[in-house]
Amino acid sequence: MVKVLVLGATGFIGFSVAQALARSGHETFGLYRKVEKTKELAKNEIFPILGDADDVSTWISTAEKVEVIIDATSPFNDGEKHTKIILDAVFEIGKKRFENNEPKLTFIYTSGIWVYDGSSYNVKYESTSLKTDKKLMTWRPSIEKAIVESKFINGIVIRPGGVYGKSGSLTALWFEGAIKGELFGIGTKDVRWCLVHVDDLADSYLRAVERAELISGQIFNIINNQSDSIGDILEAVARITEYKGEIKYKSPTNEYEEAMASSGIFSNKKAQTILGWNQRQLGFIDGINIWWNSYKAYTQ
């Protein structure tokens, strides 16, 4: 058992990660911002730490007593500034432990597959040279590099695909669109996405925590075994929601939509080999009746 602090513990990714850690017997602390979430964390055997990742004073005392810190905040707005605030604190703790000959602090950072360029049909691996072509992500490669190359911490980077399941995350936009009578995708029907269920993603963090000293300095793509076209995805959404209107495709109008309109095919073999991780949940299309049912329970 190790002590773990999850930053962003009530977020879509962070909550599932914190639950997975707690279920596996790890003493789990969760940083959260909204006081009404206190009981939800405590009921799941996660120690609630009320605060803000941008305000280090609200979580530094907990960070100093844990073996692992996981950043599951993954913001898009002011992401670089936000992440550097966290990293400065993490590196300071790590440096102190290093200088005192104490066990290294493990830091697991949530990045994403959008750091790759959008070339459609070339399979990308963790070793693929990054040529980030998305303005939203240009700052992230240098952050990843600093984490995995630091001598003061066991730095690990997780690159999730598009995340689905439960309340839906990005995929909720499609269900919401169908309900409102305007189901649409960004880009064209041929855009390909690599997705991953949030519980499968959480399992990768658990495995990284339990192998931290052995995998320090490593980056992992965490995605399903296959990619899906947006056209196929939206047809499945239309079928399960009984949407009868036209499926439309729109050109991107901002940096976020530009990223959504990019294609990518990625390999998860490294995670399978080193972490022993495998996709367990059905893909988004194959299990869409499950994800639709869950989405309705969260929103209706």
Image (cartoon, rainbow, N blue to C red):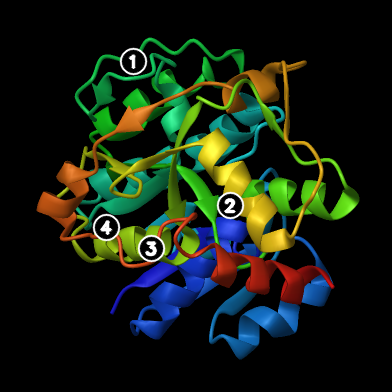
- Give the image location of residue 225, x and y in percent: 28, 48
> What's the mark number on residue 172?
none
State which mark lies toward you, 3 or 1: 3
**Residue nearest the observer in this picture, 274 or 145:** 274
Name the residue that disc number 2 marks. Answer: 236
With 211 as the anchor, is 115 left or right in this view? right
Q: Amino acid at mark 3?
A: Asp
Res. 200 mark: 3
Mark 3 lies on a secondary structure that is helix
Q: Which residue is mark 1?
A: 130
Residue labelled with disc 4:
208
Of pointers 3 and 4, the one earlier in the residue sequence: 3
Q: Secondary structure at mark 2?
A: helix
- CA–CA distance in space, label 1 to label 2: 32 Å
Residue 36 placement: quadrant: bottom right
The reply, left or right, for residue 221 in relation to residue 244 is left
Mark 2 or mark 4: name the one nearer the start of the chain: 4
